[in-house]
Image: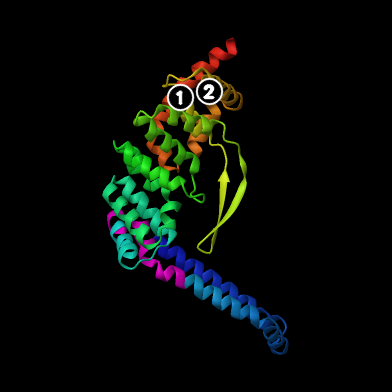
Amino acid sequence: MKFKIIFAIFNIIILFSFVLFFTAPLFILGPDHFWEVISKYWPAFILFVIAFSLFNAYFIVNWKFFTLVEQEDWNALTRFLENEIFNNKLLRSHYLKILINSYLATSDMDGLYKLKDFLENLKPRLVYQYALAFGIPYLLAQNPEEAEKYYGKMLAYPWTPNRQWLRWNYGLSLMQQKQEESAQDIFIGLLYAKPAPPEPIVLENAIYLIFKENNPLVNLLSLYMLNSFSISADKQEKVKKAKDMFLKKQSIQRLSRSFERQKHNIEVICLASTIQKAISWLFPVAESTKKN
């Protein structure tokens, strides 16, 4: 109901403003000057009509979607989105995001697999765009071999977003398979990754900016994972150096703020308890380092 009221009020205000703008000269300047103003500003009139029509058309086309969101009827919304995506093949970004989140919120991993397979056949680049969300079932399942294949495939393409998280997941899958040397290399590589300016990549007539930046939570978890290994002396030195640099830049307050800021990330939600354990593990070390 609120959505309908807001939509109606917005239209009334816009139409009133439009009528007032174009009729004011009639009352202020008289009929002669009125037609002179109209002849001068008629392109603005045409543009307004087009923009107003497009705006209303967008909301009318998506009326059922917005109504279900407002009613918080998630089961009906999921059925609606499944019909729009699977049957009508409407791959709108907000449709995909909400359906993915709905599957994750209800732990419907079969639905998520089905959506991924559907997009792979119809528009593969969307699988890479939502690679982190589609990887959650692999992250949670006790099947590291399949996880390694999935994350390896996603990382093989340079335009895949959230690459640091994907690389950490890839390293975790190697660690779970006892491929310790390879896993260590992944985690150490993440610790020493250097930020770089965004790189534009053109894919299917769309331009993507790939940001290579260090995520403090990824670095925290990399240090935490490395702590569970028996590693060689040369790698120990690298890890110690990386840990010292990390502690100079981060504090428990900064990491906690970073954790709060990234709670929109589904992986951060899934790994929340591990992140908290990693923070608790690291900062007693920080306190002893300060004393020494």
- Where's residue 72, x and y in %? 33, 54
Q: Which mark is residue 284?
A: none
- Where's residue 91, x and y in %? 40, 63
Within 10 Å of disc 1 (Cα), the crowding (few <14, some 14-19, many 20+) is many
User: Element under label 2?
Assistant: helix
User: Quick one: 114 or 251, which is closer to the camera?
Assistant: 114
User: Quick one: 268 or 228, which is closer to the camera?
Assistant: 228
Q: Which residue is pictured at 45% across the width and 36% down the height? A: 168
- Which of pointers 1 and 2 lies earlier in the amino acid sequence? 1
On the rendered structure, is 20 left or right of 131? Answer: right
On the rendered structure, is 263 left or right of 246? Answer: left
The total of numbered circles placed on residues is 2
Q: Which residue is pictured at 47% across the width and 33% down the height? A: 186
User: Element under label 1?
Assistant: helix
| Residues tagged 1 and 2 counted as in contact (Cβ below 8 A) | yes
Q: Which residue is pictured at 52% across the width and 22% down the height? A: 235
Looking at the image, what colour scheme do you see? Answer: rainbow
Q: Main secondary structure of the magenta part?
A: helix
Q: Is residue 119 magenta?
A: no
Q: Which residue is pictured at 29% across the width and 54% down the height? A: 114
Residue position for label 1: 226
Residue type at mark 2: give it: Val
Q: Is residue 28 shown above or below 186? A: below
Q: Is residue 61 magenta?
A: yes
- Image: magenta residue range: 57-77
- Where's residue 255, x and y in %? 52, 30
Q: Which mark is residue 239?
A: 2
Residue type at mark 1: give it: Leu
Residue 257 visible within the image: no
- Residue 263 position by quadrant: top left
Q: CA distance from mark 1 to mark 2?
A: 8 Å
Q: Quarter holding the C terminus?
A: top right
